[in-house]
Amino acid sequence: MRRLVLLSVTSLISLATASPVGAALITFQNLSGDPNQTVVEDGMSYTTRDNFVVRTFVGNPPSGLLGSPITSETFNIAGADNGAFTFDRYDFGSFAPGQQSDTWQFRGLLNGVQQFTFLDTTTSAFMTRTTGQPSIIDTLELAVVAVSVAAGMADNFAFTPVQTPVPEPATLTLLGVGAVGLLGYHLKHRRKAG
């Protein structure tokens, strides 16, 4: 009886927690440089903009995302299935190493509510940055927020999709049996005490 109750509680905990389903990586390879092109890559979706375009001469390796302050549009990355994910790392560089790049703002949103924001700028060629942002989001929004000498460029955005499991009928049945067993166990010991 105790094993049944323990198994039911374990099932409930696993239902209540989200689980990762593998990694996704956006590399911007083999794309045209046209703005307003919607692309699905490795389960993630984005649309190029006038100020965020894919260029074959930037990237790590080429192609990569070149961002400049031509317009104030944002560049959004979301799960192709509208699912949630975490933003783990990316490569970031200055278009003219030795000169400071434009500053990019990274914002993580979940259902339109900001979960994190941070800024990045660099004077170097590509460096891998880990975000340190464990927050679960459904949209990553990029914006160029400051103008300087060199454009910023980014590549290799790494994400971990997160899946919330749907309870199966067998799991719900097991949970119900466990709850009945727990109630019976409680009543049995209550009668012995009384």
Image (tube, helix red, strand yellow):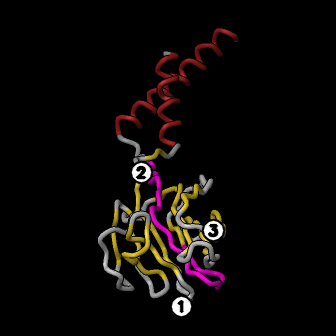
Q: Is residue 2 magenta?
A: no
- Report the span colored magenta: 142-164
Q: Which residue is mark 3?
A: 114
Image: 142 above or below 179:
below
Q: CA distance from mark 3 to mark 2?
A: 23 Å
Q: Closer to the N terminus: mark 3 or mark 2?
A: 2
Amino acid type at image mark 1: Ile
Quarter of the view holding residue 102? bottom right
Residue at 48%, 77% (x, y): give it: 66
Which amino acid, mark 3? Gln
Q: Residues within 10 Å of mark 2 (few under 14, many from 20)?
A: some
Q: CA distance from mark 2 to mark 1?
A: 32 Å
Q: Image point 45% across, 67% down: which residue? A: 78
- Counting residues from the start of the chain, the first of labels 3 and 1 encountered is 1
User: Which residue bears the numbered disc 2?
Assistant: 23
Query: What is the total number of numbered labels drawn onto the structure image?
Result: 3
Q: Nearer the viewer, residue 46 or 70?
A: 70
